[in-house]
Image (tube, rainbow, N blue to C red):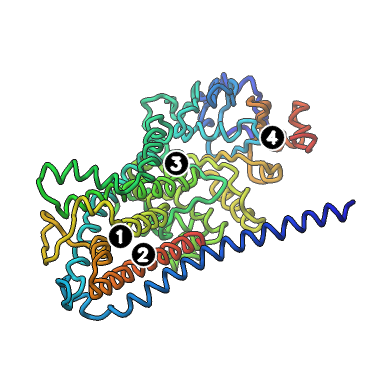
Amino acid sequence: MMNATMPIPLGETKAGAGTGTGTRIDIRDLDFFYGRAQALKSVSMAIPAGAITAIIGPSGCGKSTLLRSINRIHELYPEQRAVGEIRFDGANVLDRHYSLDVLRRRIGMLFQKPTPFATSIRNNVGFALRYHERLSKAEEAERIEDALRQAALWDEVKDKLDASALALSGGQQQRLCIARTIAIRPEVILFDEPTSALDPVSTARIEELMHEMRGRFTIVVVTHNMQQAARVSQHTAFFHLGELIEFGETGQIFTNPRLGRTGDYITGRYG
Amino acid sequence: MRSRVLLGRRLANAVAIALAGAATLSGLFFLGWILWTTMSRGMAAIGPALFTRMTPPPGQEGGLLNAFYGSAAMVMLALAIGVPLGIATATYLAEQGRHSRLAAVVRFVNDILLSAPSILIGLFVHELVVRPMGRFSGFAGALALAIILLPVVIRTSDEALRLVPDSMREAAFALGLPRRLVTLRVLWRSALNGMVTGVLLGLARIAGETAPLLFTALNNQFWSTGLGGPLANVPVVIFQYAMSPYASWHALAWAGALVLTLFVLALNLLVRLLVRKGAGK
């Protein structure tokens, strides 16, 4: 873990990254292009292990882009390109030879809108699980229950596991997506504005859940909601126009930002 | 001044509504007339014999059993050829080839095929199959129907697959699933309703096609189960019987037309039901 009181100075993240045990994902000089338009400019950032890191910044600043290059989901679109290094356990995941299968199993992702598959609740959770691991029926049922419990959804759905996932409420669907991701036991989970489509009560439940997941998973969350970043994260990165402006302890970023631009954004002067 | 502008608008509005209403009414009037005529004339000949007896010689009693069988056999075979091919093509267009130039070309050609006159397809299959084989056959008929069905299935399945939100694709890939599973288990499943709708619409389209069968399956007065020779079928029987001078044949033609109309109507109702169910989820 990072020292709890020391902010992480920008200049040192690059040099010290990957060497300490505290870094889980080490991003170095990452550039990102949508066709010819550059969305990320030489971003370097060490994502601390076992903690929640929030990424904030105005629309179009590249925060989702950063998230989407970590599990290479951007590669579904041929015109999108990430150049640089994203080191995970010493290997560069952007390397063409790095197995997407392994990468996405170890680094899960949640999206803005809940994306339940058009099948039963049980199958939603079991689908990827069955592909990645050979399990007996009993083991599979156990893993599904465990994942649903961890996602705080078990009590609501235990009697209707074979009902369609599409019949759940938005908040329940999002927790189902969390269960689905947890089921394959990733080490990192990327949250891309996970509550922007949810009501305040469902939002609170997801935030609680993220809080409980801390420590077991390394979490990176992109959010438009300042309060959310302040509530759930231990580290916050502020992006603007494709550049990482400031990265440090959440408390420090929100109470005592080193740069004026960060403070202006947080207090709502622009963005 | 202002009231004059308003008056003008009101007048234009009234004229537009009157014209649109008249157009709707005339459309509905002819549709109602056609349905009513088919119903009243067709009902007279509908009975158990229609479905249990062969097409009769002039002046004798009979039914349309062989025509129903022939139509069903050819339509089934057309579905067996057209549906897998169509869905495979649509999957390529919407998934693997979604960013490629080839997909754009295939889509364009498919749209042309979609509006190709069906008699042209009949002639094409006639030259391709009937002439080399030296005889009309159920196979040739089924092939012609499959060629008409194919673009309908491709178009609707392609659109159903493209309607699946990108976030669904991303979510499936983000779980580390391989493309084949994402396509088969996630995307097809999400697009299932739309794809079934497309197949049913295609089925409704080919069930009543006459022109392509005239040059391929022709017709057969007798019971024949094999698809290797000329095969009776409802549309061509209706065509021939309606052109004949015999009253008993006319009655059978009306009955055949009624059954066909009700079948297509039922298919369309089913499609509407599916679409509504799909929209409700």
- In this picture, is B55 found above or below A96? below
Of tags 4 and 1, which is closer to the observer?
Answer: 1
Name the secondary structure under disc 4. Answer: loop
Name the secondary structure under disc 3. Answer: helix
Q: Is residue A48 left or right of residue A127?
A: right
Q: Does the rendering let one see residue B182?
A: no
Q: Which mark is residue B174?
A: 3
Residue situated in front as seen by the camera: B211 or A175: B211
Q: Amino acid at mark 4?
A: Pro
Q: Which residue is label 2 attached to?
A: B264
Label 1 and label 3: CA atoms lie apart by: 43 Å
The spot of residue A42 in percent (x, y) is 58, 20
Pointers 2 and 4 within a single chain? no
Mark 4: few/some/many CA within 10 Å (<14, 14-19, 20+): some
Of tags 1 and 3, which is closer to the observer?
Answer: 1
Q: Quadrant of residue A240?
A: top right
Pointers 1 and 2 within a single chain? yes
- In this picture, is A80 found above or below A125? above
Q: Amino acid at mark 1?
A: Ala
Q: Earlier in the sequence, mark 1 or mark 3?
A: 3
Label 4 and label 3: CA atoms lie apart by: 25 Å
Q: Amino acid at mark 2?
A: Val
Name which residue lies at 42% across and 54% down.
Answer: B194
Label 2 and label 3: CA atoms lie apart by: 43 Å
Q: Which residue is label 1 attached to?
A: B207
Q: Chain of mark 2?
A: B
The spot of residue A14 in percent (x, y) is 57, 21
Q: Is residue A6 left or right of residue B173?
A: right
Q: Earlier in the sequence, mark 1 or mark 2?
A: 1
